Image (cartoon, rainbow, N blue to C red):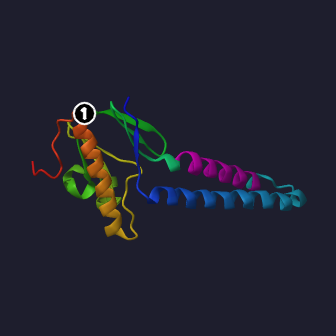
Amino acid sequence: MLSECFYQSPSTKRVAAALATASALVYLAGIVGFTRAIDTGDFVFDTVLTVLGAVGFIWATFRMTKLGVVVTAKGIALRGWLRNDFINWDRIESFQSGSDIAVGDLTIRELLAIPALQSYVVLKDGHHLRLPGLNATRLNRTQSAVRIQELLDQLEAARRKHGGRGRSPHSGS
């Protein structure tokens, strides 16, 4: 039985930790606000802060830290911000950086998100999906892009290993 492999950029967990910390501070502000609310009787704002902080902390800790791509014998699972998708190997053409995809094939939203920082799985039907958790960072962009390209190369090797008949993104055709 083939074990699963998990792919994620190094910065994803740091961003999740920062969001969890910010959420914890919001939660604490809500809790501290309750001491003021006892005098004023206005609990609404502090309740909203407390709930938002708790939900943000839980989401950052248990969902955002799992953003990434899981490779299985049957295909890849894309663990996104809010949902998961599964793509069979026989539907996958290649794995590419956003800078390798023609500008005309990108949506306005993708263009605004700086394509060079994004990673995509290109499907045989011509569509592409963003690979969650596999983004280069704006800080130290060159080193980050090299690391992401290494991960994309590993995903490409996994695609070839599992019988993918798509083209290699660096083969020129």
- Residue placed furthest toward the right: 39
- Residue placed furthest toward the front: 1
* Magenta-span inclusion, residue 173: no
> Is the residue 88 above or below the residue 113 in the image?
above
Q: Name which residue lies at 40% across and 37% down.
A: 4
Image coordinates of residue 114 in percent, x first then y, are 32, 61
Q: Name which residue lies at 16% across and 53% down.
A: 170
- Quadrant including the N terminus: top left
Q: Name which residue lies at 29% across and 48% down.
A: 154
Q: Nearer the viewer, residue 2 or 43?
A: 2
Count of marks, rendered view: 1
> Is the residue 167 above or below the residue 37 in the image?
above
- Residue placed furthest toward the left: 173
Range drawn in magenta: 46-63
> Is the residue 51 above or below the residue 147 in the image?
above
Name the main secondary structure of what is drawn in magenta. Answer: helix
Query: In the shown orientation, is residue 135 left or right of residue 22?
Result: left
Helix, strand, or loop for circle 1?
helix
Image coordinates of residue 73 in percent, x first then y, are 33, 32
Q: Residues within 10 Å of mark 1 (few under 14, many from 20)?
A: some
Three-letter amino acid code at the position of disc 1: Arg
Give the residue number, with chain letter if any, for mark 1: 91
Q: Name which residue lies at 10% across and 52% down.
A: 172
* Magenta-span inclusion, residue 50: yes
Image coordinates of residue 42 in percent, x first then y, are 82, 55
Displayed quadrant of residue 75: top left
Displayed quadrant of residue 123: top left
Q: Nearer the viewer, residue 142 or 39?
A: 142
Image coordinates of residue 22 in percent, x first then y, are 62, 61
